Every structure is written in C-alpha cells, then in structure tokens.
Amino acid sequence: MAIPIRNKVFDKIKEAGSLTDVELYKTLAKDKMVLSEDKFNKILLDLEILGLIKVSWITKDEKRIEVFVVKEEDDKVDEENRKMTEKDYEASFPGFEK
C-alpha cells in the first residue's frame, strides 16, 4: 500500500522542523516527488487545516512552514488529584505505614 503524498510531505517538514516552501519543493524534487504548484499548495493547506503545520508569509512569493507543536499545561488540580489517588491506593494495603 502506497503512502499518501501528504504524509511524505509532512515527514519532510517534520525532519526539517522549519523551512520555506521553496526549500520544501526542492527537497521533494530531489526525492523525485514532482508536484504541480496547485497540488503542492493544496497539500500544505490540508496539513494546516489538520493542525499539523503552521504556514506564514515571509515575502510576497515565499512562505515559512513550521511544524505545529502543542504545549500541554500541567493542571495543578489534576496533579494533586493524582497524588491523592496514589496515596489512597498505597494506604489501602494492610500493614502499610508511612
């Protein structure tokens, strides 16, 4: 089963972390994945809609493409609940004293 082109493009972006659309197109061309400009832009749009990449304009003709990273915040309430649950679990064993 063939890997969709969109996945291959995303893998290239992930490897680089951040690059321009021109650099990405050249990288894909080196790997013998020649795409029309319309198809290339459609793939970038799909990846952006899926929330996998972030595309921003640098100049009139050049775009910056970055992998979108979501930072998870540690919720203090959830952390305390987890600690209490662990403590209650450990205390439920007979003969357990701390």
Image: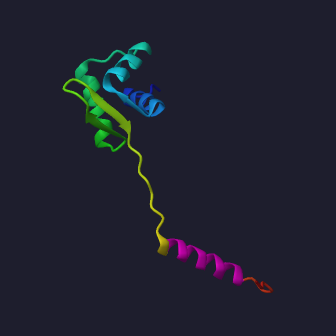
Residue 25 left/right relative to 88:
left
Which residue is found at the position 27% from the left and 29% from the top? Answer: 63
Query: Residue 92: where, in percent of width, then height?
Result: 70, 84
In the rendered image of this protein, does residue 72 appear above or below residue 64? below
Numbered range of the magenta stretch: 78-92
Above or below: residue 27 compared with residue 50: above
Determine which quarter of the picture holds residue 36.
Answer: top left
In the rendered view, does 63 fall on the left or right side of 26?
left
Location of residue 22 (image quadrant): top left
Measuring from the top left, give residue 26's x and y in whole percent: 37, 16
Q: Percent x, y for residue 20?
A: 34, 27
- Is residue 10 magenta-colored? no
| Residue 33, quarter of picture | top left
Q: In this view, does 14 lie to the left or right of 90?
A: left
Magenta stretch secondary structure, dominant = helix
Q: Which residue is drawn at 31% across and 32% down?
A: 64
Q: Quadrant of the C terminus?
A: bottom right
Can you say whether 62 is above or below 46 in the image?
Answer: above
